[in-house]
Amino acid sequence: MNQEQAIELTDLEVSFERNARRITAFTGVSLRADAGRFVVLIGPSGCGKSTLLRAIADLLAVGAGKVHVFGKAPAQVREARRISFVFQDATLLPWRTVLENVRLPLEVGNWRQVGRPNRKPEDLIRLVGLAGREDALPHELSGGQRQRVSIARALVTNPDILLMDEPFGALDEITRDRLNDELLRIWRETRTTIVFVTHSLSEAAFLGQSVVVMGVNPGRIIEEIDLDARKPDNRIDRATTEFFTITSELRAILERAYGDTARS
Amino acid sequence: MKSATWLWPISGAASLFALWWAVIVLFEVRPFIAPNPVAVVGALWTNRSLLLSNLMPTAMEALCGFFVGNFIAVTLATIFIHSATLRRMYFPVAVIFNTIPVIALSPVLILLFGVSIASKIIIAAVICLFPTLVNMIRGFESVSASELELMRVMSASRREVFFRLRLPRSLPFLFAALRIACTTSVIGAIVSEWIGTDTGIGVLIIQATFDYRTELLYAAIVTSSALALAMFGTVALLEHVFVRWRTN
């Protein structure tokens, strides 16, 4: 894998106007990730982790600091269709079948002008384990299946960076574990850079090559943990003590982040 | 099971007809005050050509008003969701305009357009415009934040956001509005015929009342409700064809 810098955030700040008051989502965020890395963002609600994801995707304006995605401004990267986003709810268009939903990014926007090769929607539906359900409508699928479709849709443009905002947050634990396994399998196959937001410790420990812990008041990065040495090739068995140890360490750091909230 | 679901409303209606009949027989209501149900059915048959020739102009006005009113409503809603300024300027005007009773508007339009079919179509259109306008604005805005973000990540144009997201999203709202418009456009057409015209179900209703031809009055009412029902059925059928999906 090339060691191109996929994400470079420098002293980033994002704030909102709400009820005529300025609210700082996060401040002083600096973060770097090589291309092909699996980065997990974890933190209490209100720490700005979803906002950070949206800043990378050019879904909102940043106040201060710099965002570089593959050395470019996020807007450029978005317009070049190199970014895909997976939302907390699957966000499938309910009037489109599974296949039509997966195909959507190829029909919308400037995809034809971009002229990059796409992946075959049918292959991706097979990849996410939904072969045979191509013609189903979203309401005929379970929550987990819908999220699989949304992952297939995100991959159809062959993105260089995949941003995932608590995609499995609403699913039961067993379904979530299975989808985590599959996400890693897909990541190994595609080696797409992934930034994954979660509030689940075990999900963070299982998925991330690095885990970025964020805190609140103000939203900021508390600590960045590199798990390369402890998870060779980003593989770990959930039933090992090492997995338990990593989860516990993350818990300790996260509790510090919550501790700050309790005082406020 | 299928027959049982049909049986309930039919037996409900039948019981009310029986009650109607019973009241007329028991209290010896005279036919020109209120006829019995069988007499109404009889009047429908004997006056069929009269009813049909008067139904035609009313149906024409109601249908044209339905199409014109809903078309303008959808167009206005489309403009309003794309321009906050125009919406702020003209939506309140639409709200105030809607408070004018349509029956009061009727003479005004006849003064403006004469006793023509145009004034009747306009009344039918005006009466179904507002519910559709409000529903369509709600429908176009019923897209979720993440759906809009999805479109943005794909660098979709405003046009694509409208045609691929907002318009299909608004279809259930559109059909809800059209169901309302089916009945209101018929009301508008009939009300418009109460002033200065010589054909239509509205005219027939007024004449039959003045002539104490009560069975004919009831038959005219049944005819107008059949018109609205036919429109309603068509809309329901189209909804069944076009909205096969459900929001999950």
Image: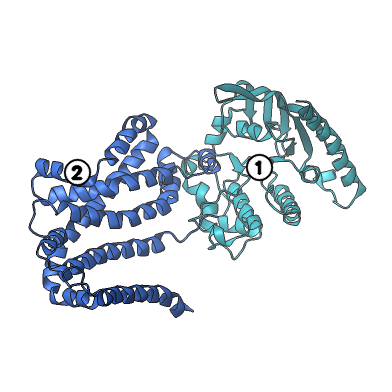
Disc 2 residue type (three-letter) = Ala
Which residue shows up at 41% across the image and 51% down it?
B173
Circle 2 SS class? helix
Sort mark 2 into few (<14), some (14-19) or many (20+) by Cα contacts within 10 Å. few
Foreground residue among B198 and A11: B198
Residue A230 shows in the view? no
* Residue placed under numbered mark 1 in the picture: A164
Disc 1 residue type (three-letter) = Met
Left or right side of A145 for A206: right
Left or right side of A109 for A139: right
Circle 1 SS class? strand
Cα separation between marks 1 and 2? 58 Å
| Image location (x, y in percent) of residue A56 | 62, 32
Which colour scheme appears in the figure? by chain
Which residue shows up at 43% across the image and 51% down it?
B168
Residue B43, above or below B85: below
Which residue shows up at 70% across the image and 31% down it?
A47
Which residue shows up at 70% across the image and 39% down it?
A197
Sort mark 1 into few (<14), some (14-19) or many (20+) by Cα contacts within 10 Å. many
| Image location (x, y in percent) of residue B143 | 49, 44
The chain drawn in blue is B
Query: Within the image, what quadrant is residue A39 found in?
Result: top right
Q: Which mark is residue B104?
A: 2
Left or right side of A153 for B133: left
Tell me the colour chain A is drawn in.
Answer: cyan
Query: Which mark lies nearer to you, 1 or 2?
Result: 2
The chain that hosts pointer 1 is A
Residue A244, above or below A134: above
Q: Quadrant of the C terminus of chain B?
A: bottom right
Foreground residue among B67 and A116: B67
Residue B185 shows in the view? yes
Report the number of discs.
2
